[in-house]
Amino acid sequence: MSELKIFFEENPVFTVNEFKKAFREGRSLHTLQTQLKQYTMSGYIKPLRRGVYFVKGHTGLKSSPDEFIVASKLAQDALIAYHSAFDLLGFGHSVFNSLYYLTSKRQHLLTFNSFRFIPLSYPIELTRKSNEGFGVEKVERLGKKILVTGKERTFVDCLDHPEYAGGFEELYHSAEKMPYLSFDLLLKYLAFRDRKALFAKVGFFLEQHRDEFHVEESLLQELEHNCPSQPVYWDRNRKENVLKKRWKLIVPAVVDSKRWEEF
């Protein structure tokens, strides 16, 4: 088997830079570009977007490349996040056809094989101080290492944006699958995010689940100390809400009672 075929077998999704790096010795840039063009014209490889290809002729593919590997290649700094991170970490409750990833690059949504690959910006509080890599893990997926937000960071990010977690019910069901949380890591990430409303949301959730996550009152007090001075809405679009005085948080009634089956 030729070196090129071996590369394609080992890299069902790859970037042009990865291709050039693998064969930069012994081949000119012109030769590499010509070979890419030939394999593309033959239908053996197909472009996903500019600079990213998948191998249609790969013997291990039944219909399409793995969606998480695809997302990891769509940007040089791609980071699997939100509900997609819960999925990759094994905590996702339901299966969705939308996959979220963070990137500092401006990109458009990509639809491929019924999946929607949705690029989102890194939280601005992290980019200001170059903390984008905090709480990030490497997960092996079909022999490839993929960057993903760890469970503590994913938990906070999803509380911040339930719309990227499948909504409140899916968020709760997914978060409740986590066996434990590192509270030190959680507090450090909250400090980096530096958003009082996030302290309130985390505090409210952990108070609701203090037995499941073995939450001590001292932790709740620390979270409470960093809460907003005035009540804030978790979701302004909800008609029925409940004020949780301790957290200065106006919570959707369904979230407060967890009456998911009624909706």
Image: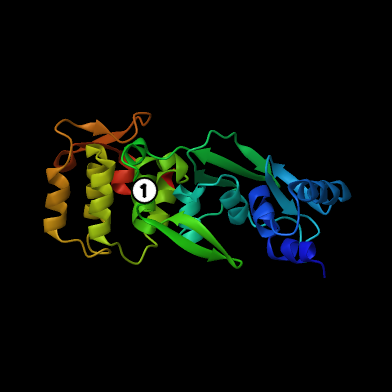
**Left or right: 261 as drawn, with respect to 186:** right
Kind of residue at disc 1: Arg
Q: Quadrant of the N terminus?
A: bottom right
Residue that label 1 marks? 259
Q: Residue at x 49, y 63 (%)?
A: 139
From the viewer's perspective, is residue 195 above or below residue 210? Answer: above
In the image: residue 61, left or right of residue 125:
right
Q: Residue furthest right?
A: 42
Q: Give the class, few, some or many, for how many residues have Cα within 10 Å of label 1's Cα (few <14, many ≥20).
A: few
At mark 1, the secondary structure is loop
Question: Percent from the top left, x then y, of residue 206?
Answer: 24, 54
Tell me where residue 236 sits by quadrant. Answer: top left
- Say if 234 sits above or below 144 in the image: above
- Looking at the picture, tell me which residue is in the foreground, 13 or 190: 13
Task: Give the camera-side residue of 5 and 68.
Answer: 5
- Give 54 or 82, whichever is nearer the viewer: 54
In the rendered image, which quarter is residue 128 located in?
A: top left
Whole-percent x, y for residue 17 in the image: 64, 49
Would you identify the image quadrant in which residue 241 lies?
A: top left
User: Can residue 191 be seen by looking at this rendering?
Assistant: yes
Q: Quadrant of the C terminus?
A: top left
Relative to residue 238, is residue 74 drawn left or right? right
Q: Position of residue 135 (x, y in %)?
A: 36, 55
The coloring applied to the image is: rainbow
Rendered residue at 46%/49% (across/down): 81
* Rendered location of residue 102, percent (x, y): 48, 43
Using the image, determine if residue 124 lies above or below residue 77. Answer: above
Identified at 78% across, 61% down, the residue is 4
Q: Does residue 60 show up?
A: no
